[in-house]
Structure formats: C-alpha cells, structure tokens
C-alpha cells in the first residue's frame, strides 16, 4: 500500500481516463476506460489491501475485435426490464410495492432472504465476526453480479437489491486522493479492536468530471476525486458508535484536505452539547454554498415557487446564512 502502487493501479491496470500529470506517481496509462468505481478492502488487507475496479469501455476502446457498436445485447432485454420493474418487493416502512416504485423512491430495494430483510439478519447477529467477511465478499461478488445482470440488461449497472447502508462521500482534489483513502484505511484498521463499531464494507472512490451545469454545485467545474466511506449500521453497538467514526474521517477530509460533501449523502457530523454526534449540523450545511450561489438560486426559487410550496426540509438550510 503506497501512493505509487495506488496510482499505478488507477492509471495502468484500470486504464482510468485521468491525465498522467495529475500526480507524479503511477506513470501514464491508456486512459481507455470511460468510467470506473473502485473498492478497497481495508479491513482484511492491512498493508496489502485488495483493490477492485468495475470499469467500462466504449467505442474504439472496447477490447473486442471488429466491435461494431453493439456487443452482446440480450435478445430478451425488454422482457427482462419489464420483469424487474414489476417485481414485488417489501421494506419495513412502506410495505409491499413494485421494484420500480421502490427504486424511484429510495434507490436499490432491500434484499430479502426467506421473506426477511437482510438488515434484520444483521441486526440480530451483532456479536458475530461478520465485518471481515462482509467487506471481502462485497468485492468478491461484484464480478458475479455484473456477469449475471449483463445476461439480462444492457445499462452497466450491477446492483438491483442491497441492504440499507450508511454512506458519506466527499470531493477532494485528485492529488489528495491517496491521502484521503489512506486516512480511511487507518481508521478502519483501528476499528478492528473496537468493541462498539467495526467497519464492515470496503472504502470506495471514483473520479467525477464536474461540469458548470448548475447554480448549486458544492465544487467548481473540473476533475475531482470522490472518496466514499460506507458501512452497515446494524453491526454497531449503537448509532453513536458509527457516527463518531464517520465524524473522525469527515473532520480529516474537510479540515486537512479541503473536501466538499456529496449533497445526497451523510455529512456535517458535529458533537452536540450533550456529547452526542449527529449529522447535518446547521453550522456546517450553511457553509457549503457561497452567498452568491444562495442569492442566485433563491431569486429563481421565489420566481418559480412564490408560495413556498417546496421551501421546506434540509434543502432550505443549505440556503440560510451562517449565524
């Protein structure tokens, strides 16, 4: 585990579409992959963690002779999509519904085994040494899931059902990508001796080419490294156990690396007066957008929603001035 090996895997092994000079480590690669999601099993790896990437190629970069623009599209693809969209699923809050309804509302619907939500299984087995198994299997199963779904669909996605997991992601300059993941590695490894919370899923990251396409963007246009920490809460002793570790990582990424948050995930962990840690702290969410961004969006919002029908919830806190 080193910056040289980290960037060599990204640039050369996964053929990421990133400039060779973005960091000196790792040399130069082909840049033939047009996207990629990276997973690192820190819990089991120590100084030699397992790293996997789900990368995709398109057009002239595809490694197939005589590629004509279509490759292996399933003959019954329309029927398979219809079956998936109308598949019956259930969660503990809303009851039974179609997969399509659940996906639109919450994303990937929960996994069930024998009609029982997998998160219920996890919650009942907190004392068992599952964290290491879960982290390694999350990586091992990706090729199997991708192969299975590629025989049915043609969109590149490989996750159609998943247990509910905690997720927080942050944008950092690519030159700080290794430092971001190395700090997460150290925190995860330290948790192996913690009786209250042990990280149980791989670290993740990807590169995002941000365009100048919205008023409310947490980062400027350009190429960014998106670092993500994920874990199942069900194996923690209580919610404070995982929140304190998430805060530890977030504090380093923001204060030391200048990170900005992914707006659709957990963020803003702060210690309250009672000593408990909670996300989405008012004193943090008000700092993400500049005064100019807030004013420009507020003017447009008031024009399109003069009665304030949609002026509610966490979204409005992002627009408030910091006290």
Image: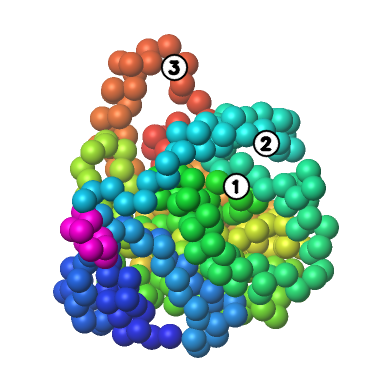
Image point 49% across, 58% down: which residue? 147
Q: Is residue 72 magenta?
A: no
Q: Which residue is mark 1?
A: 161
Q: Is residue 61 magenta?
A: yes
In the rendered structure, which disc, 2 or 1, sits on the residue that comes first in sequence? Answer: 2
Cα gap from disc 2 to disc 3, whole angstroms: 35 Å
Label 2 neighbour load within 10 Å: few <14, some 14-19, many 20+:
some
Q: How many marks?
A: 3
Viewer-side residue, 187 vs 102:
102
Q: Main secondary structure of the magenta part?
A: loop
Whole-percent x, y for residue 209 in the image:
25, 53
> On the image, which quarter does residue 134 sit in?
bottom right
Residue range (magenta) = 59-67
In the rendered structure, which disc, 2 or 3, sits on the residue that comes first in sequence? Answer: 2
Image point 27% across, 76% down: which residue? 12
> On the image, which quarter does residue 231 sit in?
bottom right
Whole-percent x, y for residue 76 in the image:
46, 38
The secondary structure type at the circle numbered 1 is loop
> On the image, which quarter does residue 291 sit in?
top left
The secondary structure type at the circle numbered 2 is strand
Nearer mark to the viewer, of 2 and 3: 2
Viewer-side residue, 226 vs 129:
129
- Whether residues under marks 2 and 1 lie with C-beta atoms below 8 angstroms apart, the answer is yes
Cα gap from disc 2 to disc 1, whole angstroms: 10 Å
In the picture, the disc for residue 89 is 2
Whole-percent x, y for residue 171 in the image:
36, 58
Q: From this viewpoint, is residue 57 visible?
A: yes
In the picture, the disc for residue 308 is 3
Q: Quadrant of the N terminus?
A: bottom left
């Amino acid at each position: 585990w080193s910056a040289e090996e980290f960037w060599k895997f990204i640039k050369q092994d996964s053929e990421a579409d990133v400039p060779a000079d973005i960091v000196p480590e790792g040399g130069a690669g082909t840049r033939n992959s047009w996207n990629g999601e990276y997973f690192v099993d820190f819990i089991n790896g120590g100084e030699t963690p397992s790293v996997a990437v789900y990368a995709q190629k398109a057009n002239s970069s595809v490694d197939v002779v005589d590629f004509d623009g279509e490759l292996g599209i399933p003959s019954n693809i329309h029927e398979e999509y219809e079956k998936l969209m109308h598949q019956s699923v259930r969660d503990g809050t809303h009851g039974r519904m179609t997969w399509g309804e659940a996906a639109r509302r919450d994303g990937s619907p929960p996994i069930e085994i024998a009609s029982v939500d997998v998160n219920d299984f996890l919650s009942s087995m907190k004392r068992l040494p599952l964290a290491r198994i879960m982290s390694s299997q999350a990586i091992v199963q990706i090729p199997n899931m991708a192969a299975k779904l590629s025989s049915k669909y043609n969109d590149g996605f490989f996750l159609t059902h998943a247990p509910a997991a905690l997720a927080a992601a942050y944008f950092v300059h690519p030159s700080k990508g290794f430092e971001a993941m190395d700090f997460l590695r150290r925190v995860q490894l330290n948790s192996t001796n913690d009786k209250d919370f042990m990280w149980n899923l791989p670290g993740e990251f990807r590169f995002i080419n941000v365009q100048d396409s919205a008023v409310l963007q947490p980062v400027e246009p350009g190429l960014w490294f998106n670092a993500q920490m994920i874990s199942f809460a069900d194996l923690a002793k209580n919610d404070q156990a995982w929140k304190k570790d998430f805060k530890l990582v977030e504090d380093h990424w923001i204060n030391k690396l200048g990170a900005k948050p992914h707006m659709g995930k957990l963020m803003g962990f702060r210690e309250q007066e009672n000593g408990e840690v909670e996300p989405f702290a008012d004193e943090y969410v008000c700092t993400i957008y500049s005064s100019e961004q807030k004013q420009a969006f507020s003017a447009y919002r008031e024009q399109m929603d003069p009665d304030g029908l949609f002026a509610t919830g966490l979204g409005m806190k992002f627009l408030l001035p910091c006290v």
